[in-house]
Amino acid sequence: MQSESREEVLNKSLKAIIVMLFVIVIISLILFKNLFFQPTYLLKSFGELSVDPAIAFKNNKPTFLEFYAEWCEVCKEMAPKVSTLREEYEKDINFVFLNVDNQKWENYIRKFEVNGIPQVNLFDRKGNLKSTFIGKQEESRIRESIANLETHKESQKEIINAEFSSIKENKNNDVNPRSHG
């Protein structure tokens, strides 16, 4: 009889521990949701915050053009830095965000030879390409290039970091006998 009551107490204790762990995990997710989900949310919002590229290249303002994808881990890591830059410079610079998974932007992807993401292209107010950044970048390096957009240097700078995501081939437009395309 005593062993049965011990077993019941152990079962109740085990259930209480499991419930406590579950509650701790839920509370942690709620408290730290920005840490876990902010970069993904920022990437999703980039498309909505974007200036249309056709307008950006004609309105006589410098342009920050970023190619990204929501699945790109490096893009997620860079998203808070890019968001900070956008908030700081959005009155003076066009911010254009093009998702490489969207077929609508295919001509821009080819035109600017996007092979890895994130790729940031900086243009002066006349639409001249001044800098290209591919992969993970320090915010200070991008800030420096933004500050130099209005200088009359003729050189174009390309900075590639080994930490970038290769673009996944979009097979939505592939035609095969079963695609009815």
Image (tube, rainbow, N blue to C red):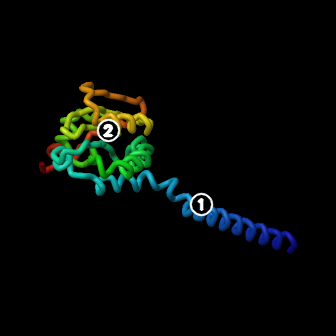
Q: Residues within 10 Å of mark 1 (few under 14, many from 20)?
A: few
Is residue 80 visible in this depiction of the protein? Answer: yes
Q: Secondary structure at mark 2?
A: strand
**Disc 1 marks which amino acid?**
Ser
Residue shown at 22% from the left, 35% from the top: 112
Compare residues 66 and 140 and report the one nearer the observer: 140
Q: Which residue is mark 2?
A: 120
Q: Residue at x 25, y 37 (%)?
A: 123
Kindly tell me whether residue 96 is visible in this rendering.
no
Residue at 15% from the left image edge and 46% from the top image edge: 58
How far apart are the two marked residues, 2 and 1, measured between alpha carbons?
34 Å
* Residue 95 x %, y %: 29, 48
Residue 90 in the figure: left or right of residue 8: left
Q: Nearer the viewer, mark 2 or mark 1?
A: 2
Q: Amino acid at mark 2?
A: Val
Q: Residue furthest right?
A: 2
Q: Give above or below for 24 relative to 130.
A: below
The answer to which of 66 and 105 lies nearer the viewer is 66
Residue to which mark 1 is pinned = 28
- Secondary structure of the residue carrying tag 1 is helix
Quick one: which residue is furthest to the left in this view?
181
Residue at 27% x, 27% y: name it: 153
From the top left corner, tell me how far across and down residue 97 is, in percent: 29, 48
Q: Badge 2: few (under 14), some or many (20 or more) residues near its Cα, within 10 Å?
A: many
Report the front residue among 53 and 14. Answer: 53
Residue 129 percent across, percent down from the top left: 23, 33
In the figure, residue 135 lies in which quadrant?
Answer: top left
Between residue 165 and residue 87, name the one nearer to us.
87
Give the mark nearer the N terminus: 2 vs 1: 1
Q: Which mark is residue 55?
A: none
Quadrant in the rendering for residue 66:
top left
Quarter containing the N terminus: bottom right
